[in-house]
Amino acid sequence: MENIKFSDLATEVDGVRFALVYGNSLGLTGTVVVKDNTQGYYPLVDDDGAVLSLTREEVDAWNENAGLSKMNVVTMTLNSMNMRKPQEV
């Protein structure tokens, strides 16, 4: 599994969206990146390779600035972990 540097992170590349996920909510250490329609996740690291642990507020703000709703992020996360999509209520 490759790492993604925070300084290199874009909101979208070639039509593929990226979302930040608060790793603790998934039992993971640090902040992770998920890609639209891609299985797996990528640890978010700084320029020295150290895993970053952004706060939930920082993660939410980044995703919001990227134009992602909470449901977008949940769906992307579930897809990346090969889990079922949530049902609309």
Image (cartoon, rainbow, N blue to C red):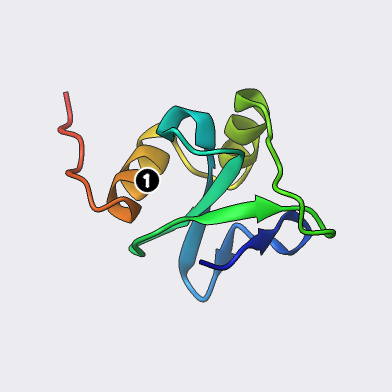
**Coordinates of residue 56 in the picture (x, y in percent):** 60, 26
Placement of 43 over or under 72, stated as above or below: below
**Coordinates of residue 19 in the picture (x, y in percent):** 52, 49
Identified at 39% across, 59% down, the residue is 40
Is 26 left or right of 78, judged from the image as shown? right
Identified at 68% across, 36% down, the residue is 53
Identified at 66% across, 27% down, the residue is 55
The residue pinned by badge 1 equals 77
**Coordinates of residue 6 in the picture (x, y in percent):** 73, 54
Placement of 48 over or under 59, stated as above or below: below
Find residue 20 and report its image quarter: top right
User: Dot 1: what SS?
Assistant: helix
- Amino acid at dot 1: Thr
Quadrant of the frame with the C terminus: top left
Placement of 32 over or under 15, stated as above or below: above
Identified at 57% across, 68% down, the residue is 2
Seen as rendered, the residue at the extreme right is 48
Is 1 left or right of 26, judged from the image as shown? right
